[in-house]
Amino acid sequence: MENNQKTIIATAWVATLLASSLDVILWKELTGGIPYWLPWIHVVALTTIFVFTLILPQLRSLRNFTAILLIIFLLGFGGGWQWGLIPYLRETAIWVNWETQAPWALSAISTHLLRLLPALIILVFLLFSGRKRSDLFLVKGNVRAPVEPSRLLGMKKPEPWTRIGTIFAVIFASVTLIYLALSNFPSLRTLELALPLIPVAILIAAINAFNEEFTLRAAPLSELKNSVGKHQGLMITTLFFGLGHFYGVPSGVLGVLLASFLGWFLGKSMLETKGFIWAWLIHFLPDVFIFTFFAFAVVG
């Protein structure tokens, strides 16, 4: 590997770690809190790297990727960071008062539309930079493309994504449903009251699946596959996605490992099918159950 390529790969990893929630995890676990100045250190560091991608020819291929990370960080979409434009807006008195008074369906949809802002900004930025929808995986792609064999999947020979994708979609959705049901099984009365909210839960699941798959996977992966290669790009987006779930459900190292596997699998689907369908569908189905149980909690 040439020294220039090593520099590009190292820079991509450093930028990713700066935008990730790694620092949040370390500070919270070791000290119990996050100093107010920490996010600004990350902003300065990410901005510095972005400037380097503008002025150094050897780093120019990382310009769009670094810009994506900056957008995600500044708007507060990265997992773990309670900092940025979106968290700020959601903490304003106007938003808090409106959210507490509005029906759950309206407030939940509004929140997820607000969280779409990074995706829309990134999409416009990449399209204006000359990228096409196919470059960003925002096409159907070849849903029957072969899955490259992998030890993680227990595969020794290629099989079509129609088979492997279907199997894992059912597995991820079923495991999510079982976990949620064991945690808080709804009563018949709760099911009856929540029935009108299920279409809302489905809509939110569709929005959230698109938002996370495009913002955290398709957009950065579309840039990384050309600058650092498909393998490194997949590993970088996998780590970023996994670290963002340290305080998810389940939390801790287990949460990171499970989210990392899911992130790797969905990123693999994009690279191999050159499309968005499998990643969105596999993410969407578990989200339907997650947001349906949120609806149960509202009426229960």
Image (tube, helix red, strand yellow):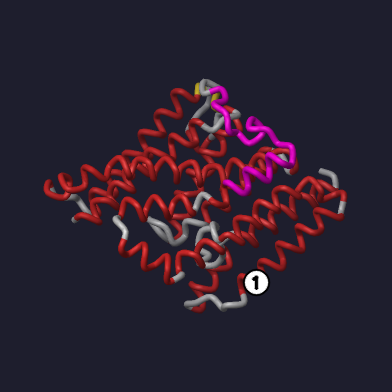
Whether 268 is drawn above or below 78: the answer is: above
- Residue 68 pos. (x, y %): 66, 51
Between 230 and 35, the residue placed more toward the observer is 35
- Residue 242 pos. (x, y %): 52, 52
- Residue 11 pos. (x, y %): 75, 55
Query: How many C-alpha atoms fall within 10 Å of the one at disc 1: few (<14), some, or many (≥20)?
Result: few
Give the magenta range.
120-142
Name the residue: 50% across, 22% down.
160
Between 132 and 165, the residue placed more toward the observer is 132
126 part of magenta stretch = yes
Between 146 and 241, the residue placed more toward the observer is 241
- Residue 181 pos. (x, y %): 24, 48
Q: How many marks?
A: 1
Amino acid at dot 1: Trp
Whether 203 is drawn above or below 245: the answer is: above
Q: Is 284 situated left or right of 56 in this image?
A: left
Name the residue: 56% across, 39% down.
267
Q: Is 250 situated left or right of 20 in this image?
A: left
At mark 1, the secondary structure is helix
Q: Is 201 situated left or right of 56 in this image?
A: left
Q: Which residue is mark 1?
A: 40
Q: In which quadrant will I find the N terminus?
A: top right
287 part of magenta stretch = no
Q: In which quarter of the view is residue 98 placed?
A: bottom left
Name the residue: 48% across, 33% down.
154
